[in-house]
Amino acid sequence: MIEEAIHPKDIYLRSDRFPHIWCPGCGLGIVLKSYVDAISKLDIPLDHHVLVSGIGCTARLPGYANVDSYHTTHGRAIPFATGLKIVNPELQVTVISGDGDLFNIGGNHIIHAARRNMDILVVCVNNFNYGMTGGQHGATTPEGARTSTTPYGNIEHSFNLPYIMASLGASYVARWTSLHVRQLTKSIMKAMKMKGFSFIEVISPCPPNFGKYNKFNDGLSQMEFFYENSVLDNNADLSEAYIDFSGKRPLIVGEFVQRIRPSYIELERDLIKRAMEEP
Ligand SMILES: Cc1ncc(C[n+]2csc(CCOP(=O)(O)OP(=O)(O)O)c2C)c(N)n1
Ligand code: SF4
Ligand SMILES: [Mg+2]
């Protein structure tokens, strides 16, 4: 009898859901690969991993990973993740969601999770637009960039995500592009071992929307831009790490923050202990 070949990563994927919904040249498959590689190398049992997302193309990612996953409402991944972690601190809670989901509709939640140093890992896939709904601009769309709702160029100043997260006290802050597959995998592994709030931004192509409006004809041409313009600088002045696609500024990537601060779960445990001891 011929045995059916099983790919070594099959146990980490819900392959019955493939083919996935993502467009050719989208960076999201690479992020899924990095997540799967990271959890396959760590010694955390599979049933301790939880993956949470909001709504969007990125937010479909947890549906393809073979871990307990929550595809929640738009912008609300962080409250779900926070609740899961508080109720069961043994879980490794990871949020993977889009820039629009996490920083536009969900912006209020993420700043407070970082401020509290809540023990979750957030991977934000930044494609600079609302990919799923037709490429509208948002708070992460770089100044001057064109989108379906900024056809003459965005006049607004954009969020600089690592700078915001670092200023709020996150324990770990990194940025990679979808070209930095190995670095992203290692970053996810490192962040999963840390206490407190970890944040990884992944700059990612969206060819039919952001790409089309900004002279990136396909995913590959945006990857070429990443290759030519990325500069590794772990000690970067984050106030200067904002992104534009003019090609005149470096696209700064790296692990910017790694610090030990009391995490929310530690502080909460300590508080409960002190409260029990009080007469
Ligand atoms: C309450 C609510 N408002 C609006 C929408 C429509 N909607 C679905 S996905 C999305 C944007 C997602 O953008 P992003 O998080 O950047 O994900 P991407 O698709 O780019 O990966 C919006 C506005 C919705 N589903 N729910
Ligand atoms: S619309 Fe953009 S983000 Fe969504 S699947 Fe296609 S390339 Fe990816
Ligand atoms: Mg997006």
Image (spheres, grey):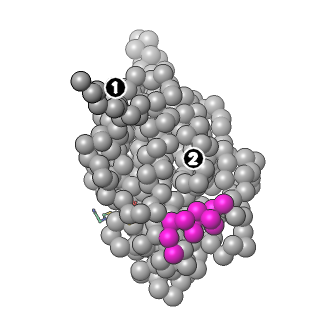
Q: Nearer the viewer, residue 189 or 120?
A: 189
Q: Is residue 11 left or right of residue 203?
A: left
The mark lying in front, picked from 1 and 2, is 2
Q: Is residue 223 above or below residue 93?
A: below
x and y, in percent, of residue 131 in the image: 39, 67
Q: Is residue 86 visible?
A: no
Can you tell which mark lies on residue 161?
none
| Mark 1 residue type | Asp
| Residue 74 occupies quadrant | bottom left
x and y, in percent, of residue 214 in the image: 54, 78
Q: Nearer the viewer, residue 33 or 42?
A: 33
x and y, in percent, of residue 4 in the image: 29, 31
Residue wearing tag 2? 181
- Range of magenta residues: 217-227
Please identify the quadrant where the N terminus is shown: top left
Q: Earlier in the sequence, mark 1 or mark 2?
A: 1
Residue shown at the point (50%, 70%) measured from the top left? 218
Q: Of helix, strand and loop, which mostly describes the magenta segment?
A: helix
SS for callout 2: helix
Residue wearing tag 1? 47
| Residue 239 occupies quadrant | bottom right
x and y, in percent, of residue 3 in the image: 28, 27
